[in-house]
Image (cartoon, coloured by chain):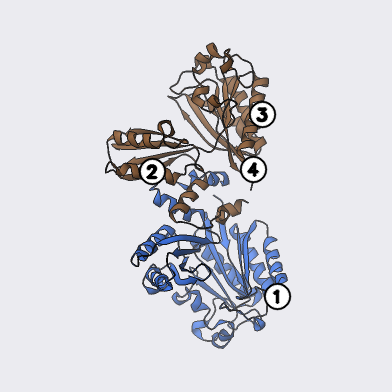
Chain colours: A brown, B blue
């Protein structure tokens, strides 16, 4: 099995195509790294890039991208709807195959140190790489955003893990971390009553007593006149897709509502879907090596 | 998407390890071909080999393997429980990705002609490559086996598609064809009454009026004291795994019996399991390109 790490940096630029192009170019220029996805949101003024490869190649590409973003993005001038604190706002490493979470935490530490020392950008380690419990949560780390952090970074509790204890004047600060793969998963209901979707979201999400690794909101799809539970499955090995689906189905039945469909947004690890097939088909002794495509990739 | 064809030749040797090794070696020696599986059954005295690659490389490897089997296997001396008619008994080509069934039929014709002309082994085209309706079915083609075919091959209805109209004295005859991927799938029941498994098998299989692409038998797993429906899913795009599972579950309920589990034997195309996940999760607009591993293989 090849050692593969995924990296999904978020950059505070979603409008100037030439800036985005230059950042993508330095990532693609690193041998052993494959750019698998990128999407820019002009109203968020933010670009999310996904690339995968061997751990050291991925770390090298991440550093070059952070360096390039520092050159091209000025946070003094950045406006957008999404919370952010730096030109490179956040850099998570995700173990995909043949790599442990601990190895991704180590990658995060090494990249954080390099960014802090060479680029003089303060770095906060977050999620599995966090050095303090309250920094596991990205919203905590990003509190106050670029503008607010400049006032509070001198406080002991806001001291960065690497780099200077002052916000870089143009590049801001960056969060670097390690986490399991995140799956963006939406479930549509047979109702136009958004209150049902909101109640179901409350039942399943960690912030109101549900599954700790689940984030969820009830929203209205105006164009389809359909209520939807929009979900982040943040650790599919802990709470798999099928359990989320079955819990939503069960909660919906309380209101006489059925699940009409579900949707995976963006990329999903094959394992998450094999898990669902295995659950429903009650598969015994199944190994992912039995998948022809997996065998071919070996 | 790379053009990939799978080839699963069956050789009439399951005991002499050195013969099997020599056949595998010529296959592995072809650049662009990957040996993904092989298993030998001493009581069947038969070896099933699975390899995958670009169409022309796969055809070249198949020819070399048939040539090697002709040199090393003498059908005059072959005994085993499995029906067989040649040193290389059967060579199916299976489209995996970027390749149509028609291209696999063409590969079968080309290989058949080469085997007939260069090795002087009579070749019958079967399944999707068959030139007569009655030759679609492999048991029809293999009727009489090696010994019987020597007496009947001169009849017009037994005339081979390629090669001489006489059985090769040591290498016999070979069937070459094209077919969809076959999935070996077993479903276990909450009963030790094999009659229930047999009744369910009758309900789903094509030979007794069920799904034409399904073969099934009811058997007893003596070691677990469990009745099992053992199934060949011969065209999972026509009748998917989840439909087989749901039909067996529904038929079992007639007897107050439940499905305790199911099992995939050997390799399975990823698509067959994604289909099951998509069915049960009611996925909308899902594309296999959303699977991270698929994106990486592009």
Cα separation between marks 4 and 1: 41 Å
Q: Do callouts 3 and 2 mark residues in contact (Cβ within 8 Å)?
A: no
Label 4: which secondary element? loop
Tell me the chain of label 1. Answer: B
Badge number at residue B115:
none
Q: Circle 4 sits on which residue? A: A3
Residue A62: tell me if it is visible: yes
Residue A34: tell me if it is visible: no
Between tags 2 and 4, which lies in front? Answer: 2
Badge number at residue A110:
3
Cα separation between marks 3 and 1: 58 Å
Label 2: which secondary element? helix
Tell me the chain of label 2. Answer: A
Q: Position of residue B294 (x, y in %)?
A: 53, 47
Query: In the orientation shown, which residue stands out farthest toward the bottom?
Result: B151
Marks 1 and 2 belong to one chain: no
Q: Residues within 10 Å of mark 2 (few under 14, many from 20)?
A: some
Q: Circle 2 sits on which residue? A: A247
Q: Do callouts 1 and 2 mark residues in contact (Cβ within 8 Å)?
A: no
Position above or below: B107 against B169: above
Cα separation between marks 1 and 2: 60 Å
Tell me the chain of label 3. Answer: A
The answer to which of marks 2 and 4 sits earlier in the sequence is 4
Cα separation between marks 3 and 2: 40 Å
Q: Position of residue B92 (x, y in %)?
A: 55, 67
Front residue of A175 and B174: A175
Q: Circle 1 sits on which residue? A: B72
> Image quadrant of residue A96?
top right
Cα separation between marks 4 and 3: 18 Å
The answer to which of marks 4 and 3 sits earlier in the sequence is 4
Between tags 3 and 1, which lies in front? Answer: 3
Position above or below: A7 against B60: above
């Amino acid at each position: 099995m090849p050692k593969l790490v995924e990296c999904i940096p978020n950059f505070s630029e979603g409008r100037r195509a030439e800036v985005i192009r230059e950042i993508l170019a330095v990532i693609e220029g690193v041998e052993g790294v494959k750019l698998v996805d990128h999407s820019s949101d002009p109203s968020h003024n933010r670009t999310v890039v996904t690339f995968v490869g061997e751990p050291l190649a991925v770390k090298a590409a991440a550093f070059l991208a952070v360096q390039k973003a520092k050159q091209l993005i000025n946070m003094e001038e950045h406006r957008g709807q999404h919370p952010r604190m730096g030109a490179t706002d956040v850099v998570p490493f995700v173990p995909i195959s043949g790599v442990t979470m601990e190895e991704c935490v180590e990658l995060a530490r090494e990249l954080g140190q390099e960014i802090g020392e060479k680029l003089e950008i303060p770095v906060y380690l977050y999620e599995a790489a966090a050095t303090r419990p309250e920094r596991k949560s990205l919203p905590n780390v990003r509190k106050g955003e670029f503008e607010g952090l400049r006032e509070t970074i001198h406080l002991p509790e806001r001291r960065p893990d690497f780099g200077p204890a002052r916000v870089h004047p143009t590049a801001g600060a960056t969060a670097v971390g390690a986490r399991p793969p995140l799956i963006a998963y939406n479930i549509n209901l047979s109702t136009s009553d958004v209150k049902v979707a909101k109640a179901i979201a409350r039942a399943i999400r960690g912030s109101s007593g549900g599954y700790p690794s689940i984030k969820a909101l009830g929203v209205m799809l105006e164009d389809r006149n359909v209520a939807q539970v929009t979900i982040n499955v943040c650790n599919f090995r802990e709470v798999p897709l099928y359990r989320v689906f079955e819990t939503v189905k069960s909660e919906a039945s309380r209101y006489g509502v059925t699940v009409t469909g579900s949707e995976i947004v963006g990329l999903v690890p094959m394992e998450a879907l094999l898990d669902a097939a295995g659950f429903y088909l009650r598969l015994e002794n199944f190994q992912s090596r039995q998948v022809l495509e997996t065998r071919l990739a070996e």
